[in-house]
Amino acid sequence: MTASSAAYRQNFGPFASDVYHAPFPDAYRGWTTDRAIDGLERLFATEASPDRVAAIIIEPELGEGGFVPAPADFLRRLREIATRHGIVLVADEVQSGFGRTGKMFGYQHAGIEPDLVVLAKSLGGGAPLSAVVGHAAMMDAPLPGGLGGTYGGNPLSCAAALAVLDVFDRELIVDRAERLGHQLQAGLLKLQSRASRIARANNRTPTALVASSTRRAREGCCYSNAVRTRTSCACCRRSWRRKPTSREGWKSSAPPSTPPDVVLHTLRVVHPLSFDCLPA
């Protein structure tokens, strides 16, 4: 179902039919909320009639797409459209959940309530576990045993998830993540003011996207690799590990429990000279 990169689809298939992709709002690329909603309505009118759409699935903050948060107004309008047409609205919080955006879940920034929420990754604190959370009427619809999976119901992983939730409550992890987000944002904006090749630097918490002002990658630089790596370019010599995204820059994700001094160290390491690996 993913469309973030050809690498995730290459040499696989056949894929499920009747999966459609609508525009995601990103003002930096000219996709305003109004334009993205128009694109969805156009899809309804030309490709998939809304009465035949089972669900709309969205990441409240793009993960593989570069940590781009969906505007609150867009999520609210999406909620209204889904309700009007009787479509299930699913929030994919696998990457954006558990404090990664400054709230427990990314959709909370818009004040909406999805019909279903998909969870994984941070839920188990490293243990393999995923979950689907939703309204009781919807979750109780399948007969007993009708829902299952490899990562569901593992006693050890469930115990780990309960411990994760206890730590979130006891150590106020979400509040810490919000503070770290402000700290990182201030530092990234300062870097942006000193490096003309940084076109944007956006984040909500210790997750961050730094984008170059153009999209042409330098051949041979680690920027061109689709995996986490270190090579000889300046940013990697300074041991800043990041993952290229959308052929425009790099992204980095640190856990919300990251100590403040680690964020400060990161900002000292990633200075304007470190961006000579960005495309020119």
Image (tube, helix red, strand yellow):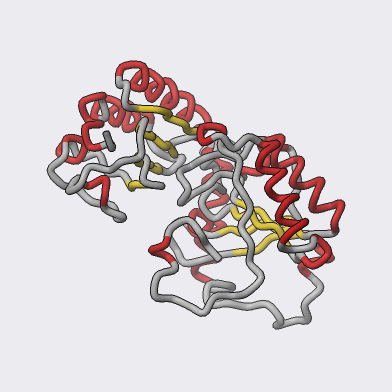
Question: Relative to residue 81, is residue 176 depicted above or below?
Answer: above
Question: Furthest residue to the front?
Answer: 46
Quadrant housing the C terminus = top left
Q: Is residue 233 above or below residue 65?
A: above
Looking at the picture, how far across and down is residue 112, in whole percent? 75, 43
Q: Nearer the viewer, residue 103 or 64?
A: 64
- Which quadrant of the structure image shows residue 276? top left
On screen, residue 236 versus residue 185, left or right, reads left
Is 280 situated above or below 158? above
The residue shown at (72%, 44%) is 38
Measuring 26% from the left and 53% from the top, which residue is drawn there?
Answer: 225
For the point 51% across and 51% down, which residue is it?
Answer: 95
Residue drawn at x 80%, y 49% is 81
Task: Give residue 1's position: percent from left, percent from top.
Answer: 56, 66
| 185 or 166: nearer the viewer | 185
Q: Position of residue 163 (x, y in %)?
A: 52, 55
Tag count: 0
x, y percent for residue 49? 79, 62
Is residue 163 among the parts visible in the rendering? Answer: no
Closest to the observer: 250 or 153?
250
Q: Is residue 56 visible?
A: yes
Q: Is residue 257 above or below residue 95?
A: above
